Each structure stands twice: as structure tokens, then as C-alpha cells.
Image: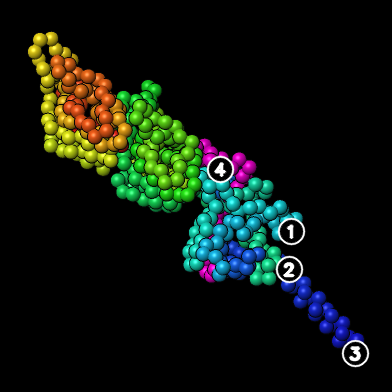
Amino acid sequence: MKLGWKIVSFLLVITLISGCSAQTTPTAPGESAVIAGKLSDGTTYEANVKLIRYLNQEQLQELYEYGLTIEEQAVGAVQIEAELNRLEGRDTLDLAEVWEASFQKAAEEAEAEHESLRIYPGGWLNSIKPLSVNESGQGWVLISQETEPTLMNLFYSDKNEAEKQIVMEIPEPQSEVLKEDGELKVGEPFMAGDVELIVEEIKTSSSVMLYRWDAGYQMNEGEQAIGLRVKINNQENYDLSILAFSAVYETDAEKLGREVVAAERAEGFEVLSEIAPQTEEIMRFMIKVDTNTQSTGRLKLAVNGYCFGMDYTLGEELDRYPVYQEGDVIETPQDRLSIKKISTVFQLNPPSTTGNYTYLKADPDMKLYSIEGTYENLGSDSVQVEQRLGILWQERAETEYGWVLIPSGNDFDTTKTCESQQQCDVDLIIMLNEEQLQHLDKIRIGVGDLVVKGQ
């Protein structure tokens, strides 16, 4: 009898021990697991973590086709959300450095190698950022070994500095690869992480041009482009890869990704590899569409792991540019244009008409639209006036580029060096027909990086 009791007690102990080591039910997608950890330097913390999204290999390929970059070895990615409830020993904690993960298709499979949660910053998918107490954040974990896994094992050190793990069920892939984080708006600043964006213009045209220099991209016959002009201020602490930017136009029939992302420069566009921290750029995004493209769709701007969308109809012209008129002074940190006179004439004469002189005369059935004024260089370096100013008229397939002329005696100069804090007379001229003159709101004037429009 006594012996039987010992056997029963032994079996009970075995059962209890086996229960402690048995696989627990994985944490479901969207549900939080609690991790109480301790690091080798004595830092202790408690965090909630959950899995909220999954991209499979086919969806990563779709992102590649949109022009967005992900590390080449990735065969999938899972998005986590974490909230730091308690932290002692540090001001912030980088969970991507203290946690590791592995992935598998089923619980009975052999455990795969541990993978780092760290992603090199600046691409489309970023790891979770360091958190302070009571802060939450989202980030991605790349999967490089197991295609179509169902489980993620998250490894950490507990309060005894022993390695522990929690098992989390991976969400089903979502149908929408570029999930929108907010509405795309024109003329209002919004944030993509620590990157500030202002969409200054969205329009459909046959060419994407600079507004202060006769340079740009011309579409082939039968093509047009959706163009976005976006001011981007990188306030992140890392270089932002240009492959972390895209624009996409989605209709019921097709999805079209951007073909060009370029920065505005004095003499044209420049394709950058990255935008440095604390740097501002004026970027142009261009999506080519043909004449058979469905007229209405969803336009998306993807930047730094965030996506913003709006309904857009081909041909719409959206901007918040200020309207210019006589007497206006248009100023940037480097430039000042003072508008003295606006006129429409058949012939424009230089300041002096004594003796031989050069004049400008419109073609038959055309007129010269003229803006006379002064330009002042407010910067510390000398500039070429014709590279700081520009004028054009544009509507869909029509683009007319004007000239920046410097009245000089009995002639007009086409180039002028303006030293720092100096000014000179200028004449912005464009030749238009009668129909175009009825739509002066299609005129754009570039003053440095600033754009103003007619009315």
C-alpha cells in the first residue's frame, strides 16, 4: 500500500514536469503577449507584443515592382507592435537588439536558426524603433529561411537572464500590399515616421517639367504621366534610400508604379540614391499611363514604410500654389522677385530704342505675355538669374515654355550672373495663342523652389 502511494506520487511529479515543458497555445494574431525581461547589464523591462500583419514572398515581389526595396534574402516579413510598460536601467530600449526570432510551418517542426529583428534603416521596411516607458511602436521582422511560415518564436532573456521564448501565430496575408496609413492631401504637412511631407502638386500632363528651367521628362506619343511634386524633409537619424519612395495608381484593371523619382536641381532633375538626415529636397514622382488607362483610381504615395492614398481622376490638377499679381514680392531664403508690370503685347522693346535695337515680336495669331520686375539674390553666393527663375503654361498634352530675359540697353540678355545681395531687371515672357490666354491659371512661375500661378 505504501509502495503504491510512492508510485502514484512519482507519476504525479512526472506529469507536472511534463506539463511545464509542453508547448503552450500560440498567441493569436492581434492578441498581446507579455514579456518580462532582464538584460546582461541589469536593465529590466516589461513589454506587450503582438503580430499585426504578414507579407509573403509574392507580396514582397509586388513591392519590388513598385520600386520599393527590401533586403534581397527576405522571403517574407511580419509586422509587430510593442508597448513598453516598464523600464529600469535605461532611458530607452531597442527591442530589435534584445529580441531574436525564428519561423516554422508547424509546432512539431525542428526549430530554425534564430534571426535578428534588426533591419538596416532607410529602406521600405524598418524595424521597430527604440521605445521609452509607456511608448508603443510598430516595426517589421524579415523572414529569410522559411517560406509561408505559420508560427514565429520570439526569444528573450527573463528576470533570471535565462533564454525564454513565446510562440506567436502569424497572421494570414492581407490582400492589400500597400496598406494606407492615412489620406493623401495637397498643401498640408503630414508625417511618415520622422519624415515630413508636403504634396505641393498633383497633375496629369504629357511632360514633367521644372518651373525655373527648361528641363524635364517628355512622354512618348500616346502616353501621359501623373506627376507629384513633393517637399520632403528627412528628420530621421539615418540616410533615407530613394528606394523607400514610390507612387502607385491603382484601378480595377491594373496597378501602375512610379517610373521616376528625381530631385529638382538648378539645371534639371537629379536621380538621388538617398536623402541625408536633416535634409530637405523637392522631389518629383512620375507614373506613366497610356490613353487606355481607366480614368478614375486610387493614387498612393509610399514613403519610409508609410502609405497615403486618395481618389484621383486623370486630368485633375491639384495644388495650393499662391496666385501672383502686379505689385507682389515673391521671396524665398535665396531669392526675391518683385513684379512691377504684367502685360500682353504683340511686340516687346528693350529699354533703349535709339539706333539699332533688338525687339521681340509674337508669331502670327500669338501674343507675348510679359511679367516685368526685378530679381534680387539674397543668398551668399553668386547665381545665374536664368537658373533661379522660369515661366511655363501647361495643360495636359500642351506645354509652352517661356524665357527669362534681362533687359540691357538696346537688347535683351539671356544669361546674367547676379552677385550676392545684388539685383537686376528681369522680364519673364511666354508666347501664347488666344485660347491659351483665356486660361492664365495654367501659368506657373518658379522662383527658386517656390512656385506661384496665374489667375
Q: Is residue 78 magenta?
A: yes
Determine which residue is flagged by label 3: 1
Disc 3 packing (10 Å; few <14; some 14–19; many ≥20): few
Q: Could you say whether the residue bearing mark 3 is in a helix, strand or loop? A: loop
Residue annotated with mark 2: 22
**Label 3, label 4: how many angstroms apart (C-alpha)?**
68 Å
Which image quadrant: the C terminus?
Answer: top left
For the point 49% across and 47% down, which residue is it?
A: 238
Mark 3 and mark 4 lie on one chain; the one further toward the N terminus is 3
Query: Which mark sits nearer the N-terminus, 4 or 2?
Result: 2
Of callouts 1 and 3, the N-terminal one? 3
Q: CA distance from mark 2 to mark 1?
A: 12 Å
Disc 2, disc 1: CB below 8 Å?
A: no
Whether the residues at callouts 4 and 1 have beta carbons within 8 Å, the answer is no
Please name the residue that numbered disc 4 is placed on.
Answer: 70
For the point 14% across and 12% down, which residue is it? 357
Q: At which x and y percent is residue 38?
A: 63, 67
Left or right position of 135 against 49 = left
Q: Badge 2: few (under 14), some or many (20 or more) residues near its Cα, within 10 Å? A: few
Residue 415 visible (yes or no): yes
* Nearer-N-terminus badge (2/1): 2
* Mark 4 → mark 1, Cα distance in angstroms: 30 Å
Q: Secondary structure at mark 2?
A: loop
Q: How many marks?
A: 4
Q: Which span is picked out in magenta?
A: 60-87
